[in-house]
Image: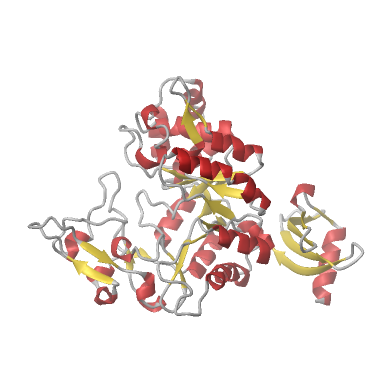
Amino acid sequence: MRVLTLLALSLLTSSTFAQDEAIYYPETGAVHIPKLQVLGDSSGKSYSIDLKNTQDSNFSVTSVVPNMSTAPGRNVQVGPRPYFLVEGMQASPLKTQLEQCGNLAFRKTDFSVGHRGAGLQFPEHTKESYMASARMGAGLIECDVTFTKDKQLVCRHSQCDLHTTTNILDTPLGAKCSTPFTPADPATGKAASAKCCTSDITYSEFKSLCGKMDASNPQATTVAQYLGGTPNWRTDLYSSCGTLMSHAESIQLFKQLDVKMIPELKAASVTMPYEGTYTQEQYAQQMIDEYKAAGVPASQVFPQSFNLADIVYWIKNEPSFGLQALFLDEIDTFDAAKIAASTTQLPDLVAKGVKYIGPPTWLLVSLDSNQHIVPSDYAIKAKALGLNIITWTLERSGLLKTGGGWYYQSVNSAIHNDSDAMEFLNLLAKDIGIKGIFSDWPGTVTYYANCMGL
């Protein structure tokens, strides 16, 4: 501790940091400086430092962690899709501006968030999907976190989605599924079904599986047919055998890719406490502990949850991580009463210490009397309260010619083609001021963000 303190004092007396990045927690008397750089050091190295107020404004050092070094400049490739979308836009100043950015040397950006990696074409939550996301310039990448039978944390969107996102039914492990495969019955019209959970199998068994595109065929009479069903606007081109990852493995990969991390603690499908002893709080703490064990500074992590109790737990027990904890709004339908309830709860979130919220895209927009897309009352109130918004999800709706479906449900009548996504994205960024957006194809957002200097 003496060496740690001397190092911190030496750094503090010969360093620089932005005043608004020194974070004080009055409830604990702690101070967190996420990025402290030594004066005269041209290497770019920085430190994350935590101090605790002891008495009479004296501070003791509790942590000094070198921030992850910047990886060699990544050759970001956004691919042809954003060019296709820009080309299809109606003539406008925005289209002209975006066209002029076609020859940029694209860079990664925190505005572009890889939703489960790059799920438009790669099996979600696989190593290949994460790497594709990074290559397209995503500055943050998501591992949805759940746990196995032996309580090991792994990356899956749901604890019980293995039957549609992996090949488990085509392996001997299919016999361990909560609900084994049942074929469709054409005579009765009963659909094919199965339910396979990470909690049905051990971590080593989980690692033996292959990731595939998230899909199933409800008319299937065989396992092979059931494992198909990929929508025609996606592809199985990269779905030969996606590499499944533990949460800890994702952390190491993201460090190598030099991206920030935005893990979501998924609701357990099993009853908690699991096996009578594994509590929700232990689950939430275990996720944070894996970042601490890997030496990842809290400034690099944006933990998420739909469960407000998880967010409050992190704010209270892991304040450095809680500072960027993202509360996800679980509203599912365009219902006036539900929208009013979500809007009304915003001041309470602020009172609880929440600084980041994650509403779905459609909750942030509405139509005015001229059928133009404008910021919603929810978005206006959130910004007035100083809440940071990271919204979800772009490039997840398939073809937009019929209105865009769920993610555009508040403005369906104003969405006519795929290129409308660029106008939609521009409104979210410029009129609402979102901090970032999840996308199933990060290259689209990376192109826009680079063009706008985000």
The residue nearer to you, when weighing 114 against 74, is 114
For image coordinates 57% across by 40% down, the residue present is 434
- Left or right of residue 24, residue 144 in this image: left
Please state the horizontal and vertical placement of residue 244, each as a whole percent of the image.
Answer: 39, 66
Q: Quadrant of residue 13?
A: bottom right
- Where 22 falls versus 292 (above or below)? above
- Left or right of residue 405, residue 20 in this image: right
Q: Residue furthest left?
A: 187
- Left or right of residue 23, residue 254 in this image: left
The residue nearer to you, when weighing 114 against 424, is 424
Image quarter (top left, top right, bottom left or bottom right) of the N terminus: bottom right
Residue 68 is at least partly visible in this image? no
- Where 286 falls versus 71 (above or below)? below
Please state the horizontal and vertical placement of residue 50, each as a whole percent of the image.
Answer: 76, 64
Q: Quadrant of residue 23?
A: bottom right
Please state the horizontal and vertical placement of residue 55, each as a whole percent of the image.
Answer: 89, 67
Residue 228 is at least partly visible in this image? yes
Q: How many marks?
A: 0
- Left or right of residue 109, residue 63 in this image: right
For image coordinates 75% across by 63% down, the residue present is 49
